[in-house]
Amino acid sequence: MKKDTHPEYFTDSKTKCACGNVIAAGSTIKDQLTEICSACHPFYTGKQKLLDTAGRVDKFRARQKAAEAKKAAEKKPEPKAEEPAEQESEEKAE
């Protein structure tokens, strides 16, 4: 076999989760960070946990409302100054 074809293997590798759980397992990466693990994943815990997506959805809805309000404000017709003048000219014609 050729030498140096495989990466270095660490038997004391640790994977740290955002929830604080630490898992010791062998890996080619010394220390790893993960956002979710079996200790905090809803599939394994049976609890529904909302991630940061709620803030993103609220921001999106706020931007959407602001855009709709702006669009509605642009569509409102301004009162025409010509209408009273047209009525006066019609009255004079009679």
Image (spheres, rainbow, N blue to C red):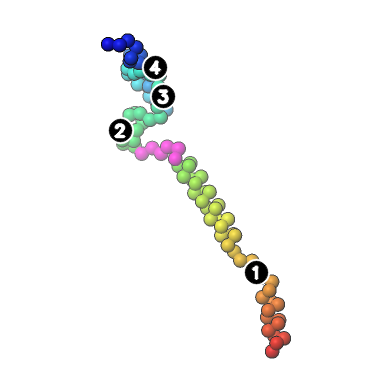
Disc 3/disc 4 C-alpha distance (Å): 10 Å
Q: Earlier in the sequence, mark 2 or mark 4?
A: 4
Q: Which residues are magenta?
A: 48-53
Badge 1 crowding class, 10 Å Cα cut-off, few under 14, some 14 to 19, many 20 or more, is few
Residue 39 picture location, percent across and down: 34, 28
| Type of amino acid under label 3 | Leu
Disc 2/disc 1 C-alpha distance (Å): 63 Å
Question: Is 90 situated left or right of 8 in this image?
Answer: right
Camera sees residue 20: no
Residue at figure coordinates x 58%, y 62% from the top left: 75
Residue 22 picture location, percent across and down: 37, 21
| Type of amino acid under label 1 | Pro
Image: 12 above or below 64: above
Quarter holding residue 18: top left
Q: Earlier in the sequence, mark 3 or mark 2?
A: 3
Q: Nearer the viewer, residue 11 or 37?
A: 11
Residue, disc 1: 79
Residue, disc 2: 44
Residue, disc 4: 30
Magenta part, dominant SS = loop
The quarter of the rendered structure image containing the C terminus is bottom right
The disc placed on residue 33 is: 3
Residue at figure coordinates x 68%, y 84% from the top left: 90
Q: Earlier in the sequence, mark 4 or mark 1?
A: 4
Residue 35 picture location, percent across and down: 41, 29
Image: 41 above or below 32: below
Check whether the beta carbons of the residues at disc 2 and disc 4 lie within 8 A of each other.
Answer: no
